[in-house]
Image (cartoon, grey):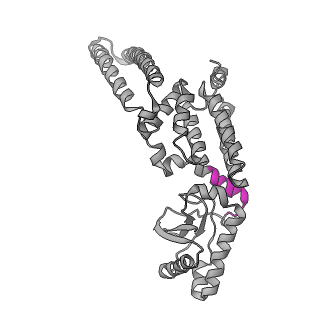
Amino acid sequence: MNQFIVECSEPGWVIFLSEELENVFRHITFERAQEIGKSLAELAHELGPEFEKVWQGFGLEVPNDGGYPLSFGKREEVDKKSLKALLDQADQRGIGKFRMRGTMLLNQDGPPPETREQYVRELRDSISSVSWEEPEFFSGSDKLPASMADYRQKIISEYAGDVLRNRAKFPDTGHRWIEDSVSRIRDMLEEVNTRTEGVMEYELERLNPAELESSERIRWAALAARLGKNVEKWLQACDESLSYLYQKAAFVWKLWTECQGRGPARSLLDSRMKHIIEQAEGAYTAEGVDALRMVHEDMLDIPWKFRKLGLFSKEDKSDEDGSS
């Protein structure tokens, strides 16, 4: 049975499907989304003018203001009691089960978007936002593994104290003192980085991912992508713990952003995303497959966007390709 969430805000209401996103990718085409909206409108008409008035103005809302697709929005207040009664009837007749919660503001400019392309883009956006919507899988991926954070802090403490105390006693003043101090601190940080990266690479090779908790395993995988070391080992270990293709795609996207699409991890992640798309062609709707393709295109396009602005050099390109 379809399940929906209804959320209300000051300027209006938004209703969105709350069942597992996997079901949307597998079964909810753009045409099916329109049919669901039509079924709700027909129910409101059957129940009478009061309910027609409540439903009037709701339209397919892609993208919505949060959560997963699909959604229907209305940019004005409604009678909450009547809307709840309509949703209760929808539940009883098998159209869908609805819940209510708070919402952010609805988009205020122009008519509700209702095109297949926008629906696919919303599916695409839902993949890249999985790390926020499903923290149980991706929590802490933007942090160092706990042991490595502690180790780097320890090494910095060993170096930084002496450097800063010596600079404090140095007789220079003004710009020359600042510039020389910055240079000394940079040298200190480079030494700390050299030492900690060596330990990180050793631990990436030594550790067994199966012996770690999920959140810590994700952190090590993100570190592997940043360093370009043992990426396949950690990617495979985390991939096996994810049930759905969209989650696997979201994980690849997450690692891609961690390494900024550069270095040795680039080609491996690119190949992995292509494989996910091939698998999806036999399981997902055409819209779902197109959404995965858009994620892949975004992955490959992001560095080039920056290069067009002159922010990437030839050296950066060789680094992206993993040739440096």
Kindly tell me whether residue 247 is visible in this rendering.
yes
In the rendered image, the vertical position of residue 313 relative to residue 87, given as above or below: above
Residue that appears at 61% across and 31% down: 261
Q: Is residue 192 left or right of residue 18?
A: left
In the rendered image, the vertical position of residue 232 relative to residue 295, given as above or below: above
Of 142 and 3, which appears nearest the observer?
3
Question: Quadrant where the N terminus lies?
Answer: bottom right
Residue that appears at 58% across and 60% down: 64
Prevailing secondary structure class for the magenta stretch in the rendered image:
helix
| Residue span colored magenta | 113-124
Residue 16 inside the magenta-drawn segment: no
Give how far across and how far down residue 238 sits, in percent: 52, 37
Residue 123 inside the magenta-drawn segment: yes
Give how far across and how far down residue 183 sits, in percent: 42, 15
Give the farthest residue toward the top.
171
Give how far across and how far down residue 209 sits, in percent: 46, 32
Kindly tell me whether residue 302 is visible in this rendering.
no
Of 305 and 8, which appears nearest the observer?
8
